[in-house]
Image (cartoon, helix red, strand yellow):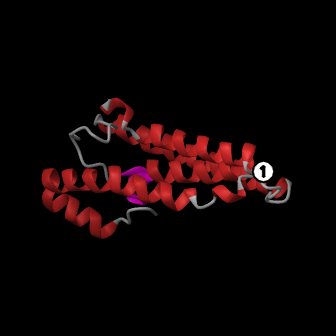
Amino acid sequence: MKWLDIPPVWLLLFVVLAWVQSRYFSYGLDFGGAWADLLGGMLIGGGLLLMVLALSEFRRHATTVNPHGTPDRLIQSGIFSRSRNPIYVGDALVLAGLILRFDAVLALPLIPVFVWVIERRFILPEEDRLRRLFRTDFARYERKVRRWM
């Protein structure tokens, strides 16, 4: 079951909740038209771009992308020089974009809940692991680069 405990599964769960809210519990609420579709598309595209940039850094440095795995290297280049967690930022942007695209007004609170879950479930344990493995390098990196952006 541990293979199910990965961020994409959590993202999918939150996306499904937003879709269900928009489909069955919309109560006639919407974001008001084309601007929401445009902004939603931009957020989804930006989130996917962040993910691709981060995954390319993982590949370039030949270390694991698995949040439960033990990394071989501390990545500080590319998009990781701007955010310690660009994939999770991308996940949150994709969720926000889909909520806009679905017109899921009442699902907006899912965004901070998703961020909270990801932080508690994945980011804090990952950072503890990095802190133990890369001690001074991670301490310096943590002071220099923000967690979210």
Residue 122 position, x and y percent, is: 33, 49
Q: Is residue 34 left or right of residue 111?
A: right
Quarter of the image with the N terminus is top left
Q: Residues within 10 Å of mark 1 (few under 14, many from 20)?
A: some
The residue that disc 1 covers is 37
Residue 90 position, x and y percent, is: 52, 50
Tell whether position 82 is magenta: yes
Q: Which residues are magenta?
A: 77-86
Residue 82 position, x and y percent, is: 43, 60
The residue depicted at 46 percent of the width and 42 percent of the height is 10
Q: Nearer the viewer, residue 116 or 46?
A: 116
Name the amino acid type tagged 1: Asp
Residue placed furthest toward the bottom: 143
Answer yes or no: is residue 13 visible.
yes
Residue 81, image quadrant: bottom left
Instruction: Reply above or below: 80 against 70.
Output: below
Instruction: Reply above or below: 61 against 146.
Output: above
The residue depicted at 68 percent of the width and 58 percent of the height is 106
Label total for image: 1
Tell whether position 30 is magenta: no
The residue depicted at 34 percent of the width and 56 percent of the height is 120
Answer yes or no: is residue 84 visible.
no
Q: Is residue 21 left or right of residue 81?
A: right
Secondary structure beneath disc 1? helix
Q: Is residue 32 left or right of residue 101?
A: right
Q: Nearer the viewer, residue 89 or 26?
A: 26
Residue 49 position, x and y percent, is: 56, 45
